Every structure is written in C-alpha cells, then in structure tokens.
Amino acid sequence: MAKDIKSLLEKFLKELRNKKKLSLATVNNYTFYLKRFLIFGKITNINQLSKEKIKAFVDHLNQPSGKNKVLNAATQNYHLIALRSFLKFLTNKGFKVIPAENIRLNKTRPKIYPLPDLEKILTLPLKTKNTAIIKLRDEAILELLLTTGLKVSELVNLKVASLDFKKGQLKISLKKSQSRKVPLDNQCQYSLKQYLASRKETADFLFISHDRACQKRSNTEQKLTPRSVQRLVKKYTKMAELSEQITPQTFRRFYISSLLSKNSDLKNIQDKLGHASVNIIKMYK
C-alpha cells in the first residue's frame, strides 16, 4: 500500500472533488492548509505523520510568524478541520494514524451581527443615486446574501434559469449535473422579480454589471465578479455608518446562526450551505 504522503494527499483531494462534490474554492483551501502542515513538519512519508509533529503544528498556528500576527481562532480551526478530514481519510484507507478526534478545535464562536444592522444595509440601495436597475440589483443581492447564506462564488455564478419562483427556490449547480436546492423567502422573491422585470439585457447570468459597455461584452464577461460583490457590500456598510466592516461572509454567518436558533439538524444545515464539514457549523453553536 502506497505510503508516499504526496500521492495520498492527491487521492484525498480527488475524493473531495469527485465524491464529496466540494467546490473548487473549498478544495483549494484544503490543499493550502494541508500543504502548509506537510511543509512545516517536513513530512514526505505517512510514517512521519506523528503525534509530536501534529502538536508542534498546532502550537505553530498559535504563534506569530515574522511580521504576521497570530492567526485568529477560526482560521486556526480551518487548518485543523482540514487535517482531521485527511486523517479520517487515511484511517478509512487502512492506515494506522492518529485518530482525528484527538485534534481538538479551538473554542470559538464567530461574531454574529445583530439583524437590525444587516437590515439597515438592505434599505440603502434604493436611497442611492444609482440607476434604477442597479438599485434593484444591489437590493436583490443583499437580500439573497442575508436570507440564503450563499457564498459569493455561488452568487456570481447564478443564472436566471437557476430561479424557480413556482417552488420558491433556486438551484445551485454542482459537479456532474448535481445540484442543491436553496429556499427563497417571499421578500427575497419579490426583490428578484422586481430586478428581473427591469432588466433589458438577455445575459444568462442573474447578476451583471449594467454599465454602458455591458452589451458589448460576452455573456460570461457581463456577470459580476466576487470582488464586485465584496466592494458592493463594503460600500453599503460604509453608508450605514456601522462601527465595524461587514462582508458577504457576515451575512452567511448570520444565516447559519439563524438556522441553529431554530434547532435545525446540523447535517441539514451542512447540506443547505454546501459546507465541507459539519465541524465548521459547530463553531457557531
């Protein structure tokens, strides 16, 4: 049985992509976290995957590196969750490695912003001097972020055909023709319908730039980028005069928290959000 750590890592990442159907962004994050661990521990063979090296890596994550600050507890946990998943994979393949449960996550709960602050942001697009279509687009984007917990990468890749107003849901396309369904509340559906009714462009993508040069671009070039959505949220956060910066991830955290407050099943929440691990959701409890 192969013991080369590099080939085992590649098999693990392949399983995340093909069997677990995780997004490319998530797989890239796992790749980064695990390679950081292997490089730190100078691990090339599975026999070098010792308890001591794992402990040293955990301690390393909690120490400042050069001019860099100590990683916050949540970011440290992302590294540890990836490592735990890799250890579980190795165990399932018949290798005798340290039990994943031996790696304890930091006790932390991401900050959840109060709903009034987030709702205040939602009211701002219609108060700007933007064109009517951009006002409606931005309002719909913020509604989606708040009420569905979508990742920015998912939001910018939504197509008009993803919406199903009869069933009150949208479809997130995954690999190999699979998808997950995301429910839409009435207010979010209303905002989306208002936006679509005002659109003249025939682009497949749901959220596009609407500038003067839009029509001259290809279908793919018309859609908003993740960076555009991040700037959009930053703009309205500043207008709201909130004390701290709010990002698209802030809306996602609020959505997770709201689901947990309703005592939703963790596996069900994981499926709704497309999370790689249920352990990430546990951090919000």
Image (cartoon, rainbow, N blue to C red):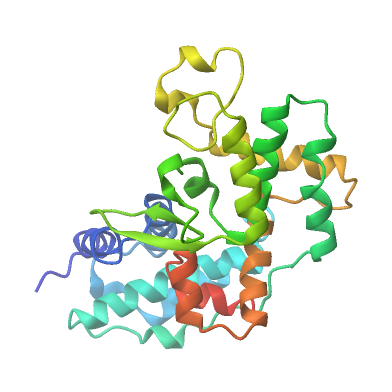
Q: Is residue 32 visible?
A: no
Which residue reaches farthest front? 166
User: In the displayed structure, would residue 31 be above or below residue 45?
Assistant: above
Q: Quadrant of the N terminus?
A: bottom left
Q: Residue at x 80, y 45 (%)?
A: 237
Left or right, 261 with reference to 202:
right
Residue 8 in picture, x, y percent from top left = 21, 65
Q: Is residue 35 visible?
A: yes
Q: Residue at x 40, y 43 (%)?
A: 161
Q: Nearer the viewer, residue 237 or 97?
A: 237
Q: Nearer the viewer, residue 92 or 133?
A: 133
Q: Nearer the viewer, residue 221 or 70?
A: 221
Q: Residue at x 61, y 86 (%)?
A: 263
User: In the displayed structure, would residue 222 be above or below residue 259?
Assistant: above
Q: Quadrant of the C terminus?
A: bottom right
Left or right, 207 with reference to 40:
right
